[in-house]
Amino acid sequence: MSMDPINFQISKFAVFLDTNVLYPSYLRDIILRLALRDTFRIHWSDHILKELREALLKKAGLTNQQIDYVTERMGIAFPDALIECNGVAVPGLKLPDAKDEHVVIAALCGRCDLIVTANTKHFPSDVLAPFGIEVQHPDQFLTHHLSLERDQTLETIKEHRKALKNPRLSFDDYLKCLINAGLVIFPNHLKEAEKLIDT
């Protein structure tokens, strides 16, 4: 599947988000804000939401009430995002770790073109290619999106920064938060566009 900006129509893309893309919060907020601009469709499953709840409870220290608020807002903003495919089996699907197969199965049920995950090694391209699904790290996904939808992406980042008021972060501190969230290339591109974002 070509990622050439000339041929790649991101507006037609359906993207399945792994749990590690929905946590940490900075990464989740950016991708969800971009999805609200209708440049791509996002999906997740009950299994993903369960894992997200566990991560927010154990790693972020949120209360169950706070987690309910996060997941409910996600559901309201994206009412068609949830994919239900319990009990579905996919013959021939063999990942390095069978515990990850629920991600691919849900992506197939939702007819997704792309899985975005920080654990790309868990989803070998040669295994998923026959199913017509590509896998990208969120850093790669956001960098591609920036190249294809530059104005919208920069405007989204600008809006995201403005929404962070407690505390208000400097531009460099904001980029450090993105780096801590596992992004490397994307923050470098944002740094180059600092004058357009930090206004």
Image (tube, rainbow, N blue to C red):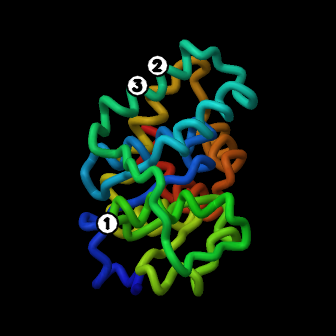
Nearest-to-viewer mark from 3 and 1: 3
Residue 160 at x, y = what percent?
45, 36
Q: In the rendered structure, are the residues bearing label 3 and label 2 in contact, judged by CB atoms less than 8 Å apart?
A: yes
Q: Which residue is mark 1?
A: 13
Q: On screen, 84 above or below 174?
A: below
Residue 63 at x, y = what percent?
63, 15
Residue at left offset 48%, top offset 38%:
29
Residue at left offset 74%, top offset 31%:
59
Residue 92 at x, y = what percent?
55, 81
Name the amino acid, label 3.
Answer: Glu
Q: Crowdedness of circle 3 by 10 Å Cα count: few (<14), some, many (20+)?
A: few
Q: Which residue is mark 2?
A: 69
Give the number of the disc on residue 72.
3
Q: On screen, 36 above or below 5?
A: above
Q: Is residue 65 visible?
A: yes
Q: CA distance from mark 3 to mark 1?
A: 24 Å
* Quadrant where the N terminus is found in the figure: bottom left
Side (left or right) of 127 relative to 58: left
Residue at left offset 34%, top offset 79%:
5
